[in-house]
Amino acid sequence: MSVFLVLEESGGKIKRASWEALAAALKLGPAQEITAVVLGAETDALAAEAAAKPVGKVVRVEHPLLNRYTADGFSLALHQLLQSQTPTYVVFPHTYQVRDYAPALACRMGQVLIGDVTGIEDGPIFTRQLLQGRLNGSYRHGGDGPCFVSVQAGAFRADSLETQGNAAPARIELFTPTIEPVQIRTKPSEPFRESAQTVDLGSAQRIVSVGRGIKGAENLPMIEALAGALGAELAASRPICDNGWLPMERQVGSSGQTVAPKLYLAIGISGAIQHLVGMKGSQCIVAINKDPDAPIFEVADYGIVGDLFEVVPALTEAVKAGRE
Amino acid sequence: MKIVVAIKQVPDRDAPVRIAADAKWIEERELQWAMNEPDAYALEEALQLKEKHGGEVIVLSAGPERVGSTIREALAKGADRAIHIVCDDLGAGAGGGLRNFDALGVARLLAEAIKPENPDLVLTGLQSEDLGLGQTGVILAELLGLPHATLILQVEKTDAGLKVKRELEEGWFQSIEMPLPAVLTMQSGGNKLRYATLMGIKRAKTKELRAVNAAELGVEAAPVATLEQISAPKKQKSTQILGGSAKEAAAALVEKLKTEARVL
């Protein structure tokens, strides 16, 4: 039994999501059976950071062509590593980057990634969400070969790792994959932002957020009135911004901003996981939705099941009345 | 440019779902179906590329009979022809039903149907709204031996191939240059979706819709990952549902937010 954990970095530091994946890996095997893997052109600092965590070993997969992430480079390098020492499990954080290459890597080894996992039970049985979070599915891996698993952000607690540090740092090994420049078929640019962010939802104390339930841009003034009465910033789930009803910078969720206000009011938002990851750290969550089974109610402190076109104006009035 | 767009029919977002008696999937009778939204964006991108550069758009979908309605919708929007990999959900015997295929199995079916077409570009949505695996496009690229990029919002044809805009996390983007042929998985929101016109709907009826039996593609269902059971999610918090009329519920909420949650 052995577990490989592929860590992801950002700006020279291991991402928090990677440590959450370590917390998940510890459900599959003890720390001494876990091998943390870091990839890049220069990985000594990353490896040192990983070696201080509860892992048995760290492997530095190092090559000049891994300087910048490409699906081809990462798949090639990890495939070679996994062929040289085949583990029972390969665990990843479920990031955009992992989604980009892990399915291809798994396929190359005749495997399927069990992606976006939210829970691991004895068996092991892996839980992942279905139908945009409306249901859970229990998955099992069969057959020979490593079991590839990626872990949803926020599903496992990384803070419990702090008390489990190693007495001495784990040993570090170097693995040098063979990669030719011609094997990297895509040329990625430096990341960029579209425009300067003028709305900082991250520091807002109160947020009123609107989703598909609003039906059309013409109904937004009703939401704006409520936000005004509450002294709240206006935000939205992805479809609202996709439709151009509100600017992209007001989007909360995995592709938008992550917020944790004192009050988060979700109006007509069903609560797909892509949205929930961006707001579930809010202190108090209120959901207004016509569907009592909407996943948003799983994270809400208070809920009103009803027609938002009736509830929102009534709420605006009640907020105003409460001020007087 | 010859473009294949892989689309999936999924339960309509607003359709109520019930867990089936065997707890392995949802009750499909009386369910409403729709085109997976990210796939609709993939189709839109394909149609726009064809309008700019010429060529052909072929839609490809796997599933039982009912999938035909979603394929017709794609043809009505402007796709030139379609391939339907006919595969029952719960077929018995050799090959089994589509639900016996995992992401790799489904991608193998699609890849076998794509290979003889030799397209310049394969597009699909970044994930499905039902299973949400988000892997089909990436596995397709691997099976077809093509370069790929995921979470794409814009596609631009260049002399050397493509330049695409990829979404990263937290509001960041990246452009990627790549040669053709290639596979892209499309993110929602990059384009505005078109509606089918009456003329389009009429013309769709005369377009080629070729049915291929899944068994003919020579792909065995040999799942590595199996969905054993589905269940309703457990609540992470105990939600206080405020009842009564809209006015009563609103007043109760304001009171709770003031005195209990203390956020007003």
Image: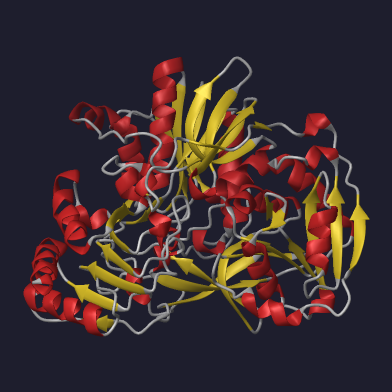
Residue B222 in sight: no
x, y percent for residue A18: 67, 63
In the picture shown, does residue B138 fall above or below A29? above
Q: Position of residue B126 (x, y in %)?
A: 50, 47
Judge from the rendering whether residue B13 lies leftward or rightward of residue A145; answer left or right.
left
- Closest to the observer, A51 or A290: A51
Q: Residue at x 60, y 28 (%)?
A: B118
Res B228 → quadrant? bottom right
Near-viewer residue (B57 or B112): B57
**Is A320 located above or below residue A77 in the figure?**
below
* Left or right: A134, with A78 as reference point: left
Would you say A297 lies left or right of B228 here? Answer: left
Residue B176: quadrant of the picture: top right
Point 25% across, 28% down: residue: B200
For the residue pair B114 and A176, the one nearer the viewer reads as: A176
Q: Quadrant of the N terminus of chain A?
A: bottom right
Query: Which residue is found at the position 29% from the left and 56% from the top?
Result: A233
In this rendered view, identify the residue nearer to me: B151 or B11. B151
Residue B113 appears anywhere in the view: yes
Q: Position of residue B138 (x, y in %)?
A: 61, 45
Q: Return the x and y of residue B107 as percentages of the image width and height.
A: 58, 48
Q: Quadrant of the C terminus of chain A?
A: bottom left
Q: How is the image coloured?
A: secondary structure
